[in-house]
Amino acid sequence: MILSGGLYLFFGYRSVAGSIQALAEESRTVIRAMVLRIISVAALVLHFISYLLYKAFPAFKFIPAEFLWNRWFSLSAAIIIGLPAAVVWIRGMIDAGPENIAVKDRQASARGIYQRIRHPQALGKMALPLVVALILNSPFLVLFSLLWIPAFYLLCRIEEKALELQLGQEYRHYKGATGFFVPRKTIIHHALPNNCLNCGALLHGKYCHDCGQKNTDINVPFKELLHEFLWDELRIDSRFFHTLAPLIIRPGFLTADYVAGKRMRYVPPLRTYVIISFVLFLLLAMTSKRSHLEELQEEPETKIEIKALDNTPGAIVGQDINVALEDTLSFDHRFTKLVEEGYRRGTKDPELFVETLIERFAQGMFLLMPLFALLLKLLYIRSGRYYMQHLIFSIHFHAFVFLTILVVTATRFLHIPVLSQWLSLLIMTIPLYLYLSMKKFYRQGFWPTFIKLNLLSISYGAIFTIFILVILLSWLVL
């Protein structure tokens, strides 16, 4: 499998890189590139055959042979991903014409789907390994197929380098007008007023110099308005991956760079946190729901016994009525009853219990992050930094924590126990990550940073414990 994939990448690279030598349009170079491209396609077919061999003879016994969900779910996902990918691939080959094999002249490729994206064929082929893995319902093959995404991205970058050498400014202009894998945002042209709609001041640009309001027209079709909102607020472009790399491997560097004013290359901190937390809480809810379904299937007798116990009347035997009334009015008794009632509701509907906790935890984190920043402000009160800088540090740190939990949760969701156990050790690196981040961003020595780390851990740990207790009490009371 690895050998066939390596052969495909090697011959694909050689076929694309060979076009760098085709500046003089030598026919021998064109034929050589065509042959290498055909060999790379043959290696891709061999790679899919290795998928079938792995399915028949799995090499890793600690990884489940199939997903625990129904096979129809995997087939549905394969259809949802495969059909659009096939359409894009075929459309790319048709619109490319005779240039879909020979890397020679792409001037004619700016037609059809190539007017919107530059690599439709690569986008279609990139999804094929994942589709095959989903059809085979293999967790290992699905994870292995994800490695093709950066591989195809690298091949496309090499191809663009070759085409820039061939076509020069013409191709650079084409790159600026089209998207890599996703179409670029369509610019909405509308007649805009010359005066600010908010204060009436004469406008000299996109923003009012008096009140700061953006000069935009909201009287547009709903489709265009929704597209602009989703693009501006929720998009995940290449900056997101440029943000993840320093967030993971360079503690504190991302915050220091962002505060220093180098912001265009990174996704805003709050958007980074929202994206990661959304995926995490969604995965936690899915994991909880599946665990609940598995418990219902495996232990039906236990559920019946619990239900029978819940329906058993709790009569007070051998006690005086006055004593019973006195106990009922006591705080301890009422609190115990409240806890028992909350436990019964959680046992009766554990899915609702987990969903409620996740929802309130997600909401409460928007309160905890400013409190974390406030603690940093108190610890570094003489640093001269503004509170917003501490808040950006807090958001980036919590985004890393959630990303770590997301990776561990994903392995458990896919039922890869050995990998899950090893990745669980990543959670133990969070204090080290926080120390390195503080040392990098605040630029203090070992002992000052170490002492402040311990003070921060104790104080924030106490706040976090109270926060968890409040969430649990909210389940009992509300």
Image: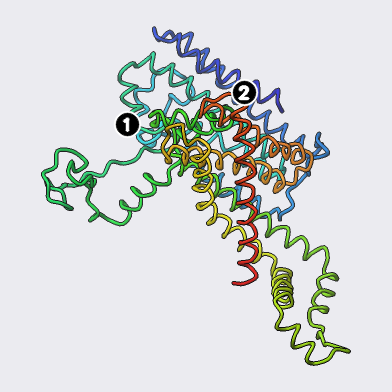
Q: Which quadrant would the C terminus be assigned to in this image?
A: bottom right
Residue at 60% across, 58% down: 358
Which residue corresponds to mark 1? 177
| Residue that extends furthest to the bottom in the rendered view of this protein | 321
Name the element at disc 1: helix
The picture places residue 1, in percent across and down from the top left corner, at: 72, 28
Residue 8 is labelled as 2
Q: Looking at the image, is mark 2 or mark 1 nearer the viewer?
A: 1
Callout 1 crowding tier (Cα within 10 Å): few <14, some 14–19, many ≥20? some
Residue 107 appears left or right of 11:
left
Q: Given contact means CB atoms under 8 Å apart, are the residues at marks 2 and 1 in contact?
A: no
> Is residue 196 shown above or below 46?
below
Residue at 62% across, 60% down: 357
The picture places residue 271, in percent across and down from the top left corner, at: 46, 44
> Is residue 120 shown above or below 288?
above
Name the element at disc 2: helix
Residue 113 is labelled as none
Q: Earlier in the sequence, mark 2 or mark 1?
A: 2
The picture places residue 324, in percent across and down from the top left corner, at: 78, 87
Q: Amino acid at mark 2?
A: Tyr
